[in-house]
Image (tube, coloured by chain):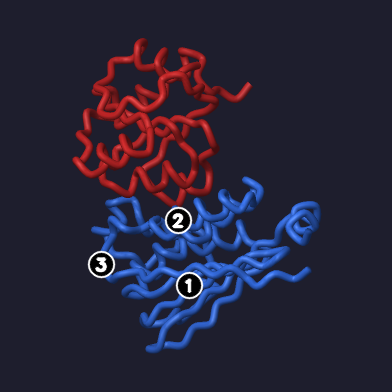
Amino acid sequence: MTQAPYIEEYTIQAGDFTAIGEAATRFKSTLKMLGISSEAVRRAAVVAYEGEMNALIHGGGGTVKMTIHGDHLVIEVTDNGPGIPDISLAMQEGYSTAPDEIRELGFGAGMGLPNIDRNSDSMTIDTEIGKGTTLRAVIRFSPREAAARAV
Amino acid sequence: MKIADILEKMETTVYSPGDGEKSIDGVILGDLFSFVMAEAREGWLWITIQIHLNVSAVAVLKDVPFILLASDRKPEKELIERCAAEGITLAGTPLTSYEAAGKLYSMGVGGRS
């Protein structure tokens, strides 16, 4: 039986650093409530957290959306920021364009995109200079978990 | 080692007691959130000098039950409140991160063996 996907979406307000991790925390609660394996929950939490942080630091706010399907989930982060001029550079561990005052607070370590990539089964970035960026990360459930969810 | 035992053996100020019966299986030391998000494991103790609210968000997401603030850093009120609400142990120590890590290691907490 195919179930309709479950969708949860939050707005990330520009400049609200204290709120980083709120969407990720809510996603985590939802996934735990749905009985998703702790491995997938952990990966989704990292992806959502880093996505929120990127949208806030670099994108001036945006949205973060989680869609749960039978055998996988998708986390999509959209911002209306300046876009990423060089994605391969942004993917390099340690490379960051975050300002010093943000880095001193523990953010902007240049590990966000690599962390997202490592914790997802596939990741795509659509970016346009001056328009914004949409990141889409897919996390697949284990075959056993997907089968259990299909019942 | 249980959180209560660690608190007893170290010089700490407890801001949020959390669950003293929980056992600590490892320790991570870091002030960059993305590093901690990548490397921390469930049930670990986290030593940091960051003191703002977002510390608790990382702890919640990574199931870290114990945050230890080094170098006598005083937590912001919002961080204390959130740790209390989430049942996370939040304590401060006058020891530096290096000294706190050394002390925990010598106590047998979370070494890789």
Q: Residue at x 38, y 82 (%)?
A: A80
Q: Which mark is residue A77?
A: 1
Q: Percent from the top left, x then y, of residue B28?
A: 46, 34
Q: Nearer the viewer, residue B54 or B10?
A: B54
Q: Residue at x 35, y 11 (%)?
A: B8
- Identity of the amino acid at label 1? Val
Q: Is residue B44 left or right of B103 when viewed as pictured?
A: right
Vertical order, B91 against B35 (above or below): above
Q: Residue at x 63, y 49 (%)?
A: A35
Q: Residue A136 lies in what quarter of the image?
A: bottom right
Vertical order, B99 against A79 (above or below): above
Identify the residue position indicated by label 2 in the image. Answer: A26
**Picture colour for chain B:** red
Callout 2 and callout 3 share a chain: yes
Q: Is residue A94 visible?
A: no
Q: Earlier in the sequence, mark 2 or mark 3?
A: 3
Q: Which mark is residue B91?
A: none
Callout 1 and callout 3 share a chain: yes
Vertical order, A81 against B99 (above or below): below
Q: Nearer the viewer, residue A10 or A92?
A: A10
Q: Nearer the viewer, residue A25 or B98?
A: A25
Labelled pair 2, 1 in contact (Cβ < 8 Å)? no
Q: Which mark is residue A15?
A: 3
The chain coloured blue is A
Report the chain holding disc 1. Answer: A
Q: CA distance from mark 2 to mark 1?
A: 15 Å
- Identity of the amino acid at label 2? Arg
Q: Residues within 10 Å of mark 2 (few under 14, many from 20)?
A: some
